[in-house]
Image (cartoon, rainbow, N blue to C red):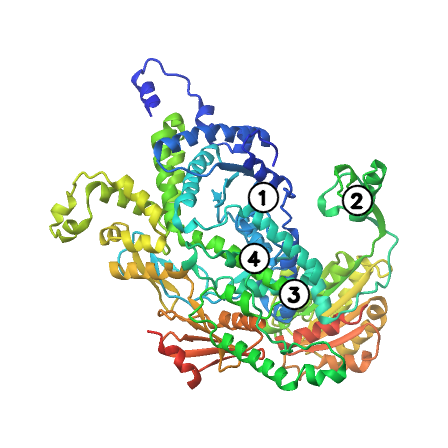
Amino acid sequence: MSSFQQYSNSPGDVPSLDTEALTRHKMTVKEFAGSRAAQERLIAEWKGEIEEAVRAACPLDFFPQEFVVVSWKQLQVILARDGFPKRFEHWSFGQKYASQQVHDTYGLSRTYELVLNTDPCVAYLLDSNSVQETRTVMAHVYFHNMFFKHNPYFSETNRKMLGKMGEHADRIKKYQEEHGPDKVERFLDTALSIDNLIDIHSVALQRTREDYAPTAGLEVRQTRPITPVRFAVPDYLDRYVNPPEVLKAQVEREQRERDQRLKNNPPEPVQDILMFLMKHAPLEPWQQDILSMVRDEAYYFAPQGMTKIMNEGWASYWHSKLMTDYLLPRYPSEIVDYCEFNASVLAPGGQRINPYRLGVRLFRDIEERWDKGKFGPDWDACRDMEERRNWDKKLGLGGQEIINALLTHNDLTFIDRYLTPEFCAENKLHVNRETSGGDVVIDSEDFKRVRSLLVHSLTNLGRPKLAVINANHANRGELVIMHSFDGRALDLGQAKTTCQNLYALWTRPVHVLSRHDNGTSLKMSCENGNFGVHQVAKEFEKYFEGES
Amino acid sequence: MSTRPHNDPSTSQTQQHFSALDTASFGIEPDVRRFRDIVKGKVREDLKDYITSDDIVAQHGKDVISVPIKEITIPRFIFGSETDGVGEGEEGEGDAPGKKGGTEAGNHMREEQFHIEELADLLGENLELPRIKPRLTSGLEQAVPRYEGISRQGPPSLRDHKRTFREALRRTIAEGTYDEEDPTIVPIKEDFRYRSPRLKPRPKTNAVIFYVIDVSGSMGDLEKSLARNTAFWADAWIDRQYQGAEKCYIIHDVAAKVVDRETFFTTKESGGTIISSAYQLAKEQMATRFPPDQWNIYVFHFSDGDNSSKEDNLRAGELLKQDIIPFVNLFGYVEVGGHSQGGGFIRYLDSEFGETEGVVLTQMGDRGDIIEGIKDLLGTGR
């Protein structure tokens, strides 16, 4: 900015306008640097500059950062595979890739950044982004990195996932060779269909080592007949050495133990249904292994879904600060383009929430409130609007509080803790309702409704919560899964196929208990390959009793 | 990725991870191929619906056709349609911020691109159409690229694995690094061999399709659309078999004229019908523009069969017998519309040509008959 003033203060000495310098930052990285090696040198140079600014601006540290420059085509593949260049073969990645190409052709979406939760932290830079965009993205990336490192929900994620994903791909490739691609594809279709049936509350806990090991602790449900131990003796001695009563008693004891195990199984509801099936469904080792890989990947991705608003908010909050305080003064000609870029990223979502915008505004709100002491009993008790408006205790705790938020919360608890009626009003958050005609109208701007809906949509990653509550219903080895109803009914069409997939794994009847929109209970059952939705029969009523 | 000087050992791990991959596309092709196969399977299953609907037929003339299909999803336990959501922005309470994007979950449609030739092949598979045996092949030649050569450079998709392996094996044996105990062979850049194209002349076959339609007053919108759908798929199939065919459109009521495709399907006259006028014109066109000794000729005639007089039936039959049927691969007559009690030209044709080879007579009352009609018309393999 100062350089502009210099020019206007000396009207007699108008320098010839260096238009090239003014527009250089609009060039793409590729145009600017030329070869890939030159691009990487350039990135390395900016990296030093930005890292220095990051350290000066924020007290938290971060993983070593690595940037990989990719072309648009490469990025499309990487995006289709959720950020990983190498993943197991499955048509669903081909589908995502194909739809991205359509989006690209119509200019529907532009991806600015893609960061992986790994150590070292890997981020992709698009060689067709402009110089200015690239620098902003780089600044942004460092704070995702920091978020991954310090937010507790990421503490148990595998930071070597880049290699791990490749390993999964190799293992599945091997199974394709051993068992045929069709069989493996069918099983993957089944496994992916239940990949959301994990216990996201255990994400931040250290799951036991046993749980990590792909095959440890597995007790396949015994469908094999029980064969008693016999001593190998000549036939004429058999009657004496292996008396039939003893053998019979052995079989009975074993049967009792098995029954007991099944009856007690599980002692309390198991939300990690993937784990449960790995342990107890009659699967072949390769199938168990695939299930374990799908589960590992699901647990790896879960915290990112749980912290979308916070993570984007955190990174956007800091990149703005970094750019305006440290970096733009060095590149004053970029200010307009930076602002335009920033405005487009932080534009209001309209019918849907833009997580970048909501997150960054909440962080700024927290900073202001804790700087001015707008919290605690005094603040809550104050009803004088004038006083509230001018409230400033000059505590200066804002910087610390946003770090506390990072160190403690996920989106759900973050919203619950920090969303205020004033914030809702100021940002015009509202509840949308879709009318029968397909129009979307604003239904309410009531704070309580907005908050409760927002919290609802973030609970359990916005997925229905299901748990195994009995694995031996009526002593017939039938699986009973309960959906904890919170007012929202399941999509019955998809539930049908998913039920059939569960049945394919479990091989005994599977029952899913849930409720209709109006609250009446229902039972979806898959028995012998036939699916049906029924009223809840007497024998299943007991399962609803514990439910509140 | 290429090398960037860096001392951090973990960095090189990431670099290694990337450089071990086929960085051009990270090997996404098999996934895309498999997905396309699944989509194709869906289209094949539902092809009959596409044949009778207008979605595809309306895109006539394009090489690449968008086919709307139901989004393929991996089923999961998800919530049913949710009517409430949190939004943000300027409007006040009660305002309508607009239509919701997309339709309900699980009901998403998606457009998949298909080359018209792929659709023609699917049509052939679905209706079990025999491949056409051309009546004649002309002496004309055209150059067609064939992958018969081998070169050291080329795209990965054309890699010849067998030859590449052989080269690598030869090299490792020559180098003395071949280990019988562990016969793993890793090809290096010099070993790769690719198939390369060579232009090869191939005899060219000419084909022309005559579409003849009755535009008299009794031909309504339904009749037109039956003709349009049939013509679209006949075009696709015959074009596929001949690498492109000329089209000649003839409309007639009491008199006939040659028109363009647009006019063909939109013209509506009010007069009567004299079928022989159209056959006369077709005969002239064959004589002047498409001599039968050089062209494979197809004639498809759509009419409601309400010819003006018995005499004209005879005149038309004479033209067919003398000047058309002997010289064409196929003469197809489609009587469209459900109300053809009047003239019943098809009955006359059936009595005259019912047993003649190269003549197909079929009726289409409504859209449900299109499939069978197409099967009749194209099922002769001629």
> To which residue does mark 4 refer?
A293
Could you tell me how far apart the alpha carbons at marks 1 and 3 are, in whole angstroms? 28 Å
Q: Which chain is mark 1 on?
A: A
Q: Residue furthest toward the right?
A: B139
Which amino acid lies under the numbered mark 1 shown in the image of this protein? Gln
Mark 4 vs mark 3: tell me if same chain: no
SS category of the residue bearing label 1: helix
Does any portion of residue B197 appear in the rendered image? no
Q: Is residue A341 above or below residue B368?
A: above
Q: Are marks 2 and 1 in contact (CB under 8 Å)?
A: no
> To which residue does mark 3 refer?
B41
**Pointer 4 or 1: first along the chain:** 1
**Pointer 3 or 2: first along the chain:** 3
| Horizontal relation, residue A439 to residue A71: left or right | left
Q: Is residue A326 above or below residue A287?
A: above
Query: Residue A55 at what x, y percent from top left?
Result: 38, 32
